[in-house]
């Protein structure tokens, strides 16, 4: 293996591990909130604070489901670093997840910024949290995952 291909391989590994970390970082608050925590909950919106008070079991179940899905998506890049590297279904799932994260994160951030700038919002803390924390985090996660997938593909082309 040439020096260039080893560097590209290391870059792909670093990006995919970073994507996994970002995904787990994004998933963790959902479990914390499901267990009754409330730190940063107001950055989601007043509606979720009310839902936590009115239906804590329902909200907890939904948040555990969200945590589980985000964790599973977070682990996809790590699977691509192992024996499943050449799994076409796994790569398609990772590419799909990356595209969804990028589109959802970018559109959510833009919508919340537009609402903050051009309307009189009733829940500014929630909108600011969505515009500055949660949607950008999804966008960054998706972009890092896409970069890792692209670099991994380049490794495969170089070694072929």
Image (cartoon, rainbow, N blue to C red):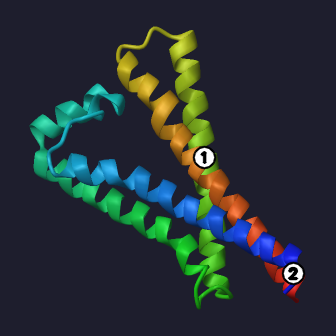
Q: Residue at x 42, y 28 (%)?
A: 129
In the rendered view, would you say 97 is above or below 123? below
Q: Residue at x 65, y 55 (%)?
A: 144
Name which of mark 2 and mark 1 comes first in the sequence: 1
In the rendered view, would you say 75 is above or below 63? below
Q: Is residue 84 left or right of residue 133?
A: right
Estimate the x, y position of residue 154 in percent, counting from the top left. 83, 73
| Separation of residues labelled 2 and 1 (CA atoms) | 26 Å
Estimate the x, y position of residue 5 in percent, counting from the top left. 84, 77
Q: Quadrant of residue 36?
A: top left
Estimate the x, y position of residue 155 in percent, counting from the top left. 80, 77
Give the position of the N terminus as an image quadrant. Answer: bottom right
Q: Secondary structure at mark 1?
A: helix
Q: Which residue is mark 2?
A: 157
The crowd level at tag 2 (other Cα within 10 Å; few <14, some 14-19, many 20+) is: few
Q: Residue at x 79, y 77 (%)?
A: 6
């Amino acid at each position: 293996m040439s020096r260039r291909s080893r560097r590209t391989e290391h870059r792909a590994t670093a990006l995919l591990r970073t994507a996994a970390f970002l995904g787990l970082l994004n998933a963790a608050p959902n479990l914390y909130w499901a267990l009754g925590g409330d730190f940063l909950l107001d950055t989601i919106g007043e509606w979720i604070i009310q839902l936590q008070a009115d239906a804590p079991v329902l909200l907890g179940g939904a948040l555990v489901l969200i945590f589980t899905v985000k964790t599973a998506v977070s682990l996809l890049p790590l699977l691509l670093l192992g024996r499943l590297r050449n799994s076409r279904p796994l790569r398609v799932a990772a590419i799909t997840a990356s595209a969804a994260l990028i589109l959802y994160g970018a559109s959510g951030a833009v919508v919340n910024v537009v609402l903050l700038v051009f309307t009189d919002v009733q829940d500014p803390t929630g909108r600011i949290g969505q515009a500055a924390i949660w949607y950008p985090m999804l966008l960054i996660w998706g972009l890092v995952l896409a970069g890792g997938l692209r670099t991994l593909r380049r490794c495969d082309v170089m070694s072929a």
